[in-house]
Amino acid sequence: MIELEGVSKIYQMGGRPLYALRDVTETIESGDYVAVMGPSGSGKSTLLNVVGCLDRPDEGRYRLDGRDVGSLSDEELSRLRSRTLGFVFQTFHLIPRLTAAENVAHPMIFAGVPRAERAGRVARALEAVGLADRADHRPSELSGGERQRVAIARATIMQPRVMLADEPTGNLDSAAGRQVMELLESLRSQGRTLVTVTHDPEVARRAERVLWMRDGAIARRLRGRDLAQAGLPAGPPGPP
Amino acid sequence: MTAVDLLATAFGAVRGHRVRTGLSLLGVAIGVAAVLVLTALGEGARRYVEGQFSALGSNLLALLPGKNETTGAFPGVGGVPNDLTLDDARALSRLPQVRLLAPIVVGNETVSHRERSRQVSVMGATPELLEVRELAVRLGRFLPVEDPKRGSPVIVLGVDLAGELFPGQNPVGRVVRVGDWRMRVVGVLESRGTQLGMDMDDVALVPVATAMQLFNRSSLFRVLIQTHAYAELDATCEKALEVITERHGEEDVTCITQDSVVSSLSSILRVLTLAVAGIAAISLSVAGIGIMNLMLVSVSERTAEVGLLKAVGAARRQILALFLAEAVLLATGGGLFGLGVGATAVGVIAYLYPAFPVAIPGWALAAALGLAIAVGALFGVLPARRAARLEPAVALAGR
């Protein structure tokens, strides 16, 4: 369970504080599927980074499964990122010199998974994203959709309970995007929590809940299936 | 993360950036090669000088008249109260520590044969000089064994002098003029080169008593004493001074051992070695700064990668270990490459200048490689520390 309590993230811009997140309080239950929407610069990615322990809030408290993340050491945070959280990025962030299989295996090296066990797990993970035949290709030899599927295989290799995706389809054509979203949703149906930042109302509509952000705060909360009636994607949301 | 994983991952990263890796290897290799070549030259100089000294013969001490080492060019002038005579030498030779004793007198004189003449150092000596100065005879024989006071008119020529006076001929048995004297050539020395400033190839040797008459000297220039053992040098010096003091009524001679000469020279060599080591250190630190630059570039290029490593669960310590392993791999690889280049360069120098005994001292090999690795590790890890401290989100954004 993800519990944010009065979380703020503040950057100094020309000596004046700029709130990337402003007093965000939100609870995401285990197994939930949440889409985060909002205009550019509204703090969507910052929210996801804080939830994914890639960034520290400047104010407020973040509890993950009941543990206060702010009090954890670097080692403990690494363990969380390794075993509890799986992150998928818009720009994939694959290491170009490594093959698909090596990219997928990377998290297991740091987690100390024995060498003998890795090959089997990599093969199964690539199989699950439909890229068993691309194992020895480098990212430059893969299409965008294939790259994102490799990234998803990497994010799931340590069997995390929470999947976080920052505009996972942002750099993909619609067909590849649909494939990627189906993959992520299938992961969620296996009991994982899924939080995705997206611009695409088609994607958001399928989520259980949608968080609409504006100026670093959650401006509206609605159910995914009500998104069409809310009229939000057409323009900035009006006051609730 | 196991050690095998660490090395494999670091090796993959090193192999994955060919240009950067190539430049790092080159930088370290040049530094290490420079250290090797410079220390080899320094070592060569040291060996060369040492070789010059050992050619003189060890276990050697010299007695000279006067209380100071620096008397005038002509002993007997300059406040020497008593001559150092052949009788003194005879008395000294009775000391049990003395193995060989060679009294000498030195002067300059013109040696001529018919129209050819040459101004050379003429040394008055006894047969013992042959062994004391480690000389050898090429033709004929050395100075005759006779009463040192007799002084027969015979002469032994240095090989260059013999060649100048008797080009293409055997001089043994011929007569040369030395100043106003006529002397019979009995032998020619083997080539010996320069011994401490005295060209033993361009010299003439005559019996000591002959030289004393020739130069009208009453005192010896020096008495060389070879002891049985190196350890007896100092004791022999004391005994010799006692003998002379007893005979002259005062201590009016000076005893120099090889040690005193070597120690003054070794201080010069120490400065030389320090200078060489300093130059070598500069070249290695330049290589170190090169590694640091490359590592800085590499880390800022790979800040996003560091962010990703953190995002997939690498701890700060693991990331540091990874970059450390990369830097050490680079430095070791470059160091080994540099050892090869340096050894080849030294080999070429040795081939081109066979007379100069260049050699890479063992400590230089170890120090150059060790320093390269230490420098690589230090300068490689410093930039990586910065990246590893960033929040993953910041690093991922590549800022």
Image (cartoon, rainbow, N blue to C red):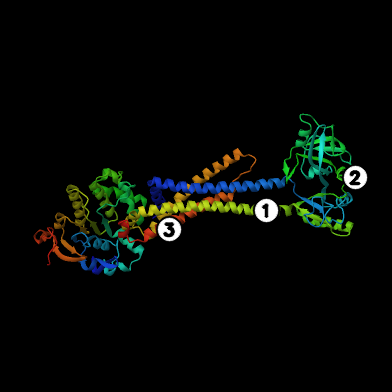
Q: Nearer the viewer, residue B105 or A171?
A: B105
Q: CA distance from mark 2 to mark 3?
A: 80 Å
Residue at numbered disc 3 = B382
Q: CA distance from mark 1 to mark 3?
A: 41 Å
Q: Nearer the viewer, mark 1 or mark 3?
A: 1
Q: Residues within 10 Å of mark 2 (few under 14, many from 20)?
A: few
Residue B283 horizontal side relative to residue A41, left or right: right
Residue at numbered disc 2 = B149
Q: Amino acid at mark 3?
A: Leu
Q: Residues within 10 Å of mark 3 (few under 14, many from 20)?
A: some
In the rendered image, residues at marks 2 and 1 fall on the same chain:
yes
Residue contact between numbered discs 2 and 1, judged by CB atoms under 8 Å: no
Residue contact between numbered discs 1 and 3, judged by CB atoms under 8 Å: no
Q: Residues within 10 Å of mark 1 (few under 14, many from 20)?
A: some
- Percent coordinates x, y for residue B256 in the rendering: 77, 54
| Chain letter for mark 2 | B
Where disc 2 sits, the SS reads: loop
Residue B370 seen? no
Q: Nearer the viewer, mark 2 or mark 3?
A: 2
- Percent coordinates x, y for residue A35 in the rendering: 18, 59
| Chain letter for mark 1 | B
Where disc 3 sits, the SS reads: helix
- The extreme front residue here reads B115
Q: Nearer the viewer, residue B216 or B373?
A: B216
Residue at numbered disc 1 = B266
Of label 2 and label 1, which has the lower sequence position? Answer: 2
Residue A240 horizontal side relative to residue B15, left or right: left
